[in-house]
Amino acid sequence: MTALPRWTGVGKAVSFYRYFAFNLPVLTTLSALGLLLGLTAVQLWTLFTHREVPGYFTAYLALLAAGSVLAASGVALGWAARTGVLRRGGRPAWTLGSLVSVVSLTVYLVSRTAGLPGLGELRGRWDYVPGTLTMALAALFAGLHFSVLTGLNVAAPDRRHWHD
């Protein structure tokens, strides 16, 4: 897996963290929690206010909200842990948060371009505020996770021995 970035040169492009980085693990973690909980709030609001949607879309919203809550709790528990083994347990939570974000972005973009069965009225509706907010929160979390993966931001202080 590490050979591909080295062969393509992408590894050097994203290795900018060697030259500068942000030593704010608490801010990074709190930002992640805020983005995930915001995503959860928007999904739950959409779930409870839109009763005339197909069953698969209701299940999708419920799964996204559950995934966001699970990821947020994993990030919080990984942060609160004081031992290195438990702290590394937060990494799958970040990955789950990114997965939820990417799925949310994908479904939003597909629903607005190609449309979804039973939700044809969403096609071309780029002005729907909860959808735009979902897209923004999901993109920001995915970007934050990318910055943590590249080392630009630190979410677990024991990785670089940085502490707030």
Image (cartoon, rainbow, N blue to C red):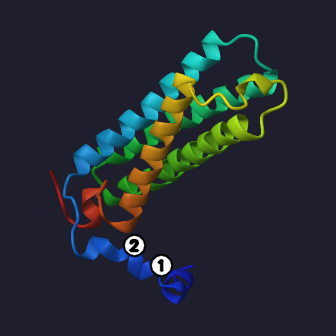
Q: Which mark is residue 14?
A: 2
Give amino acid for label 1.
Val
Q: Position of residue 126 (x, y in %)?
A: 60, 31
> What residue is at 64 percent from the left and 37 percent from the top?
108
Residue furthest to the bottom? 7
Q: CA distance from mark 2 to mark 1?
A: 6 Å
Q: Could you tell me if residue 32 is visible in this image?
A: yes
Dot 1 lies on which element? helix
Percent x, y of residue 102: 59, 48
* SS label for mark 2: loop
Looking at the image, the residue that sits furthest to the right is 117
Quarter holding residue 91: bottom left
User: Image check: 153 left or right of 109?
Assistant: left
Position in image of residue 80 (x %, y %):
30, 43
Numbered disc total: 2
Q: Name the kind of residue labelled 2 in the image.
A: Val
Name the residue: 48% across, 45% down: 139
The reply to whether dot 2 and dot 1 touch (C-beta < 8 Å) is yes
State the residue position of label 1. Answer: 10
Residue 93 appears at what percent x and percent y? 48, 48
Identify which residue is drawn at 24% across, 44% down.
27
Q: Is residue 37 left or right of residue 103?
A: left
Say which residue appears at 39% left-offset and 51% top-offset.
144
